[in-house]
């Protein structure tokens, strides 16, 4: 049985006239008759009865035409999906992101994806840089929106946001809590809460780079790889943690009722860049469709003024599954 035999039979069933059916299919009548005979032979039943006066379906033909239409419909749909996926208009893409990406990249990118590629299913997973890159390498993620970029030929990357400021995080009882800004050098007299470098190498290096520029050493009193754990620690001890300004502005440090305050660091202002990263040799067209929807890089640093203004929410016109991990 061939697909073209099904199409020929359906056309005969609709026209009940071999001449008109052959004309619709741009076939000769003998060729159309031959295709019907091959289909009937493969099934072992007679589908069409005809004489010099009429063409009609047999009882088997009436039952089979319904199933034949379903088969053709499924094949046509499968063809459309395959072509749409190849063109990046359909398919799936799994994206890792962090807080700045959530506030400054995803709102516009998802809205554009919804408008231009409504059939692409996007799954979002909030993770720190290190876990994102591990999942990207392992194939769990297709795109990582992360601080810094990997220095390996296994990945490709593109700058998305420049100079995202880092801030100090302290408890409301800390002596810095009422200050608008603190020179970085004052960290020399403070115990700090730091995360492991493999969790976010670019942020880690920016903090210690600013310490080097200030000619001080950081006293790492405790470690915590989770922002919520950092908030808990600084809320009960006179320690200083670190976070990006977008996370501080979002209220993300006040998890589980922890009372914390973000204080700007200056002289120097430690900053980090946000990149979109994907695998070298990527073949999923939906990945490139999403990358095309991401705006060009912009600088988030605003000096010592007020907080950065951001869109109020991530739009929801696109199919999105959202996961959250540490």
Image (cartoon, rainbow, N blue to C red):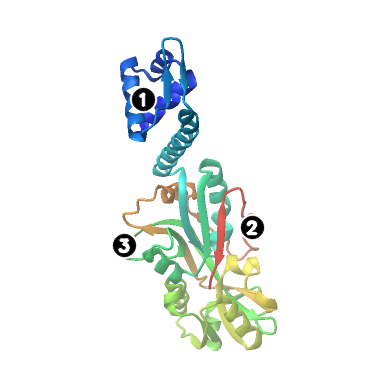
Say which residue label 1 marks: 36
Circle nearer the N terminus (1, 2): 1
User: What crowding class fits label 1: few (fewer than 14 Cα within 10 Å), some (14-19), or many (20 or more)?
Assistant: many
Quarter in which the N terminus is drawn? top left
- Picture quarter containing residue 4? top left
Using the image as rendered, state which of residue 41 and residue 118 is in the foreground.
41
How far across and down, in percent of the image, does residue 166 sit? 54, 70
How far across and down, in percent of the image, does residue 61 sit? 46, 28
Using the image as rendered, state which of residue 19 and residue 300 is in the foreground.
19
Determine whether, in the image, residue 218 is placed left or right of residue 86.
right
Circle nearer the N terminus (3, 1): 1
Say which residue label 3 marks: 154
Q: CA gap, disc 3 to disc 1?
A: 54 Å
Circle nearer the N terminus (3, 2): 3
Q: Nearer the viewer, mark 1 or mark 2?
A: 1
On screen, residue 130 above or below 32: below
Q: CA gap, disc 3 to disc 2?
A: 35 Å
Say which residue label 2 marks: 309
How many numbered marks appear?
A: 3
Q: CA gap, disc 1 to disc 2?
A: 68 Å
Q: Nearer the viewer, mark 3 or mark 1?
A: 1
Determine whether, in the image, residue 116 is placed left or right of residue 84.
right
Determine whether, in the image, residue 321 is placed left or right of residue 277.
right
């Amino acid at each position: 049985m061939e697909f073209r035999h099904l199409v020929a039979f359906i056309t005969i069933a609709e026209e009940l006239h071999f001449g008109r059916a052959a004309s619709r299919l741009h076939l000769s009548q003998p060729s159309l008759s031959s295709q019907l005979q091959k289909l009937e032979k493969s099934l072992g039943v007679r589908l069409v009865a005809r004489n010099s006066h009429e063409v009609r379906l047999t009882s088997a033909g009436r039952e089979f035409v319904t199933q034949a239409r379903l088969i053709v419909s499924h094949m046509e749909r499968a063809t459309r999906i395959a072509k749409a996926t190849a063109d990046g208009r359909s398919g799936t893409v799994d994206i890792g992101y962090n807080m700045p990406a959530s506030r400054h990249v995803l709102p516009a990118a998802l809205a554009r994806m919804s408008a231009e590629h409504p059939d692409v299913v996007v799954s979002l997973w909030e993770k720190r840089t290190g876990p994102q890159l591990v999942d990207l390498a392992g194939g769990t993620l297709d795109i990582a929106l992360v601080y810094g970029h990997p220095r390996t030929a296994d990945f490709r990357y593109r700058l998305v946001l420049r100079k995202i400021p880092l801030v100090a995080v302290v408890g409301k009882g800390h002596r810095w809590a009422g200050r608008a800004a603190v020179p970085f050098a004052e960290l020399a007299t403070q115990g700090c809460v730091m995360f492991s470098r493999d969790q976010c190498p670019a942020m880690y290096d920016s903090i210690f780079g600013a310490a080097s520029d200030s000619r001080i050493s950081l006293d790492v009193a405790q470690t915590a790889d989770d922002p919520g754990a950092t908030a808990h620690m600084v809320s009960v001890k006179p320690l200083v943690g670190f976070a990006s300004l977008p996370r501080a502005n979002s209220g993300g440090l006040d998890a589980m009722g922890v009372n914390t305050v973000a204080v700007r660091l200056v002289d120097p202002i430690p900053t980090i860049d946000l990149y979109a990263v994907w695998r070298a040799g990527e073949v999923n067209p939906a990945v490139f469709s999403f990358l095309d929807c991401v705006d060009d890089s912009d600088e988030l640093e605003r000096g010592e003024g007020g907080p950065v203004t951001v869109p109020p929410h991530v739009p929801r016109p696109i199919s999105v599954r959202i996961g959250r991990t540490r």
